[in-house]
Image (cartoon, grey):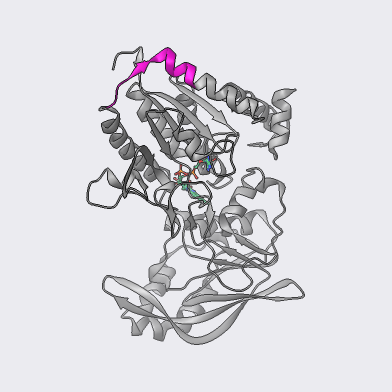
Amino acid sequence: MSDDRVHLVAVIGAGPAGLFATRALAAQGARVLLLNRDIKPGGLAEYGIFLNKYKMKGGLRRQFQKILGDPRVTYLGHVTVAERGDLTVPELASLGFDAIVYAIGAQGTKYLGIEGERLPGVYHAKDLVYHYNRLPPFSERSFPMGRRVAIVGVGNVMVDIANYCVHFCDCDEVVAVARRGPFEKAYDDREFEDVEDAFDRAWYREEIQRIRPRLEAAGQNADELLTALAARSEPSPRARTRLGFRFLASPRGVLAEGGRVVGLEVEETRLERKGERIAAVGTGQTSVVPCDTVVFAVGDRVDEHVGLPYKDGLYLTVPGEDPAAAYQVLDLAAGKAQPGIFVVGWARRASDGVVGRARLDAETGIKHVAAYLAERPTRPRAEADRAIETLCRTLAERGSEVVDYAAVQKLEAAERARAAADAVEEFKFVSDREMLDLLRG
Ligand SMILES: Cc1cc2nc3c(=O)[nH]c(=O)nc-3n(C[C@H](O)[C@H](O)[C@H](O)COP(=O)(O)OP(=O)(O)OC[C@H]3O[C@@H](n4cnc5c(N)ncnc54)[C@H](O)[C@@H]3O)c2cc1C
C-alpha cells in the first residue's frame, strides 16, 4: 500500500485485544480510529490486573503508549458503541469504514439463576474488580466487604478477590467454593503464592479428609494432595485472615435474614468421569457455608445490549471450518458473514486467558482482516482523516464528551503528580466527572 493511500478501519474497545489489533493494522499501513467506552485505554490491563502488580501494568502501559502515539492511530475515549451508546452498531456500519473490529471484551454478567443472587452483599467479580481498580462508575459505588467472604469459583480471578479480601479488607475468613474438587482447580500456583500467607493448611487437610471418599470414588488420590501440601514451605509472617476451600459444593442460593446475607446454600456433589472431563453431579444433599458476603468469580459473558448478534453469552460468528469464520460477525438473516465486521479478544471468547492470549487472538484476527482488506480499494489518506474529523464533529454535536489521546496524556500526568504528592505508587481519579472537569478546566 502506498503511504498516501490507506484503508480506514475502526477498532472498538481499547483493551489489550483492541490495542494490539490497532498496532497490527497500523503496521500494515491502515488508518485506525480506536473508540473506547472508558476515558482511559487499557481495559482490564488497566482496570482488572491486580492492584499492586505495578511492574506488569507499567510494562503494558508503555506498550500501549507507543501504539497510541502512532500518527496512523486516532484514539477517542468515553465513546460507547451500543444500542443506547454514543453510536449504535448500524450507525457505525453506515459510516463507510473498510472494516470494523469489535474488541469490547466480556462486559455482561454471568448470573447462575439462583435465589438471592442480587441481594446486597452479593457481588459479581468483574464489578468488584472494576471497583477496587477504580473504573468509573464502579469506583463511585460502595462494595462493603463483611468478615466472612465466600468466593464462588477457583480460577485466577478467585485468587485476586481473595488477595483483595486478605490484604486490603478487614476479613476474618475467606472460603473459595468449588463445584468440583482440588484436582480440577483452575488457578495457577504462581498466582496463589500471593495469598499463601492466609492459606489455612489445617483447614485444607480437614476438607481433603471430608471429601476423601468422593475423590477416591472418582479414582483420585487424596494423599497426593496432602503430600504436595507438606512439601510447601510455611509462609511467614501469617496474614490475619484465614483462607480455605469448600470443594464438591454447587451453589443453590444465597440465604439472608433481615436483608443481610448469612450463608451460601450449596448442594454436595460427587465427581463423574465424562470422557476426558470430570463433571460434578449433585447428590441432593444440601448444606450451608456461613458467610456475610458472596462474590461470584465464575467468568463473564459478552454484553448482549451492544447490538451485535448474540446467543448464550457470546456474539455469533460464522459457523464452519474456515479459520477466518470464527472472527467474522454473522449476519443472522443472510446466514453468512457481515462483510468487514470482525470480533477479537474476550469479545470473541469471554473470559479466555491472560493478556498474551488476548493479544494473540487479536493478531490472528487482524490477519483475517488484512486478507479481507486486500480485496478492497484504498482511499487517499486525507480522505480517511476527513472521515475521522467528521465523526468527531458528529459526536460533539450530539453532546458526547469525547477524550482524545492528548487529553489522556494530560490526565495521566495529573495522576502521576498526585501520586508523587501523596507518596503513593499510583493514583487514579474516581469519577468520569472529575476527569472531564480537569480536562475542560
Ligand atoms: C480480575 C482479572 C485479573 C486479571 N489479571 C491478569 C493478570 O494478572 N495478567 C494477565 O496477563 N491477564 C490478566 N487478566 C486477563 C486480561 O485482563 C485479559 O486477557 C484482557 O484484558 C482481555 O482483553 P480484551 O481487550 O479482550 O478485553 P478488555 O480488557 O475487557 O477490554 C475491553 C475494552 O473495550 C471497551 N468497551 C467495552 N464495551 C464497549 C462498548 N460498548 N463500546 C466501546 N468500547 C467498549 C472497554 O472500555 C475496554 O477498554 C485478568 C482479568 C481479570 C478479569
Name the residue furthest left: 321
Question: Would residue 392 be found to the left or right of residue 222 on screen?
Answer: right
- Along the line of sight, which residue is nearer the eye, 168 or 399? 399
| Placement of 216 over or under 368, stated as above or below | below
What x and y, as percent, mark residue 212? 41, 83
| Placement of 392 over or under 2, stated as above or below | below
Question: Would residue 42 be found to the left or right of residue 349 on screen?
Answer: right
What x and y, as percent, mark residue 376? 29, 26
What x and y, as percent, mark residue 292? 68, 70
Let me know if residue 334 is in the magenta part.
Answer: no
Let me know if residue 378 is in the magenta part.
Answer: yes
Question: Would residue 122 be found to the left or right of residue 367 on screen?
Answer: right
Question: Would residue 364 be found to the left or right of residue 208 on screen?
Answer: left
Q: Decide if residue 406 is in sight here.
A: yes
Say which quadrant the N terminus sits in: top left
Name the residue furthest right: 258
- Along the line of sight, which residue is nearer the eye, 319 or 60? 319
Q: Quadrant of residue 238?
A: bottom right
Say which quadrant the C terminus sits in: top right
| Placement of 410 over or under 170, stated as above or below | above
Q: Decide if residue 408 is in sight here.
A: no
Residue at horizontal 36 percent and vertical 46 percent from the top: 331
Count the marks: how many?
A: 0
- Along the line of sight, which residue is nearer the eye, 196 or 19? 19
- Along the line of sight, which residue is nearer the eye, 383 or 301? 383
Residue at horizontal 29 percent and vertical 35 percent from the top: 367
Residue at horizontal 58 percent and vertical 40 percent from the top: 85
What x and y, as percent, mark residue 423? 70, 34
Residues in magenta, as a range = 376-387
